[in-house]
Image (cartoon, helix red, strand yellow):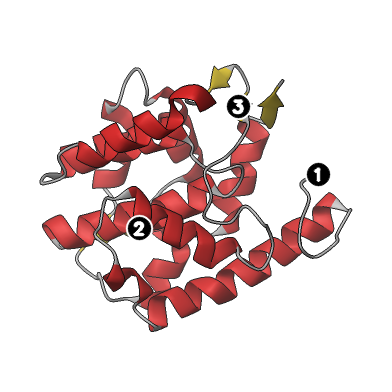
Amino acid sequence: MLENKLGITNSAELAREEERLSKLRAVELYEKDILKKFSAGTFKSLSAIHYQLFQDVYDFAGKIRTVNIAKGNFRFAPLMYLEESLKNIEKMPQSTFDEIVEKYIEMNIAHPFREGNGRSTRIWLDCILKEEIKKCIDWSQVDKEDYLLAMERSPIRDIEIKHVLKQALTDKIDDREIFMKGIDVSYYYEGYNIYTTGVIK
């Protein structure tokens, strides 16, 4: 149970409120063109996305995590190397689809926030795709199980996640419905069934 601004102590209730509030903020993110203030592919832009989505729920919205975390047997970037990792990821090339997905994978491995990485990073990914190749992902065309399993294996084999995402590319980059599908909370909670987030002591 994460500490939250809402004073909620029931995990199911927190999940519902987090989803409701983050989706309201996502609409605002889209309609006010907030992301146009930031360069696609930078950590600053990702931090802005995370803050926008979760500012009503968590004090750590937009802030780099201060704990080591893992999902199942996989440990994300150790805290002592996290800031350096983010600098290196920011420098990665992003001019082709393959380069962009490789950068996305590395950001997932970094997992810079205590919570809400998946939703924030999917929007971040689409921002880069729109900027560089005038495409984005139609997440309604992505099989959730295929996506989660491919992401789990992506640190050692990225061909699967590239295939899954490439099949769902669309040129409808100004479609609000497609944008909103990227933060569909069902991706996040189904992911919870596959790997459970935990803080490493």
Q: Is residue 157 shown above or below 103?
A: above
Please identify the quadrant where the C terminus is shown.
top right
Q: Are marks 3 and 1 in contact (CB under 8 Å)?
A: no
Q: Are marks 1 and 2 in contact (CB under 8 Å)?
A: no
Residue located at (12% from left, 56% from top): 133
Query: Which callout, 1 or 2, points at the residue further toward the start of the chain?
Result: 1
Percent of width and height locating residue 156: 35, 17
> Of the numbered discs in the image, which one, if any, rests on residue 174?
none
Looking at the image, residue 198 sits to the left or right of residue 55; the answer is right
> Of the numbered discs in the image, which one, if any, rests on residue 45?
2
> Distance of mark 1 from mark 2, alpha carbons?
27 Å
> Distance of mark 3 from mark 1, alpha carbons?
16 Å
Q: Is residue 6 visible?
A: yes
> Which amino acid, mark 3?
Asn
Structural crowding at the residue carrying mark 1, measured as other residues with C-alpha within 10 Å and reported as few (<14), some (14–19) or many (≥20) = few
Q: Is residue 51 shown above or below 194?
A: below
Percent of width and height locating residue 188: 58, 47
> Which amino acid, mark 1?
Met
SS at circle 3: strand
> Distance of mark 2 from mark 3, alpha carbons?
22 Å
Q: Which residue is mark 1?
A: 1
Q: Is residue 162 visible?
A: no
